Amino acid sequence: MIFVSRLPVGVSLGYDNGALSIEAVFAFIKRKIYPPQRKKKKKEKKAGSFALPDFLTEDKWELLKLVLEALGRFRRRLCMDHFRLRYISAGDDPYRSVMRYNSVNALMSGLAPAFENAFYVKKREIVLDVDFSGESVFELGFSLSIRIHQILSLGVLTLASLLKLRRRSRNERKSSNGEQVKRSNAVNDEQH
């Protein structure tokens, strides 16, 4: 059980000159999700009605705060196994090619520290270049993973916070209903 909980689960995305690819990763097994290899006919499902629980509509700001806290718990737990960026700026006008190169270089210089703080990055491969005679090339790929035990621990913590929020919402409704009953009894006593 401990061995299984230590296995990584993740997703691998890639973009190579207009072609997008997505793979799901479990341990060392990869399965291609997009582009689909073949399409199967799917049976149409009847749309069922889905209603949000009543505490979600009243405490939407508290819920938003809870979601942000849960996402904050993912910080530095997501592991970026591999990050690959290859951009070669090219074109007929050398000035524009250099300006595009400078823009991408400045963007990467600004994003790199924030990126390093958000993820644990194992391997990075960033190639930025200018080619005055060829064609522009843009390739981006990354692989994110998280361990199963980390997902379970984050799920338990988030569920506990959600139950706490729900309990507090119920207690507030009960107390506000009790105050309204007391006020109406006091008003009735004054009238008689």
Image: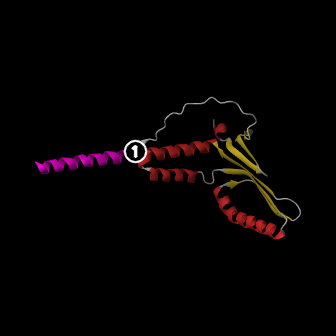
Q: Residue 15: give x, y in percent of width and height.
A: 75, 50
Is 171 inside the magenta-drawn segment?
Answer: yes
In percent of width and height, residue 24 lies at 70, 41
Residue 168, position in %: x, y? 39, 47
User: In the shown orientation, is residue 99 left or right of residue 1?
Assistant: right
Pick the front one: 172 or 137: 137
Say left or right for 58 vs 112.
left
Residue found at x 88% / y 60%? 134
How many numbered discs sit on the rendered protein?
Answer: 1
- State left or right for residue 165 relative to residue 85: left
Tell me what residue is drawn at x 80 percent, y 68 percent. 98
Residue matched to label 1: 167
Type of amino acid under label 1:
Arg
Give the farthest residue toward the left.
192
Residue 164 visible in the current orientation: no
Residue that protrudes farthest toward the bottom in the picture: 95
Residue 11 seen in the figure = yes
Residue name at image x 68 percent, y 50 percent: 79
Quadrant of the snapshot with the N terminus: top right
The residue segment tinted magenta is 169-192
Task: Using the image as rendered, state which of residue 80 and residue 22 is in the foreground.
Answer: 22
Which residue is outermost to the right? 133
On screen, 22 above or below 85? above
- Mark 1 surroundings: few (<14), some (14-19) or many (≥20) residues within 10 A: few
Question: What SS does tag 1 mark?
Answer: helix
Residue at 64% across / 39% down in the picture?
5
- From the viewer's perspective, is residue 109 above or below residue 61? below
Residue 177 part of the magenta segment:
yes
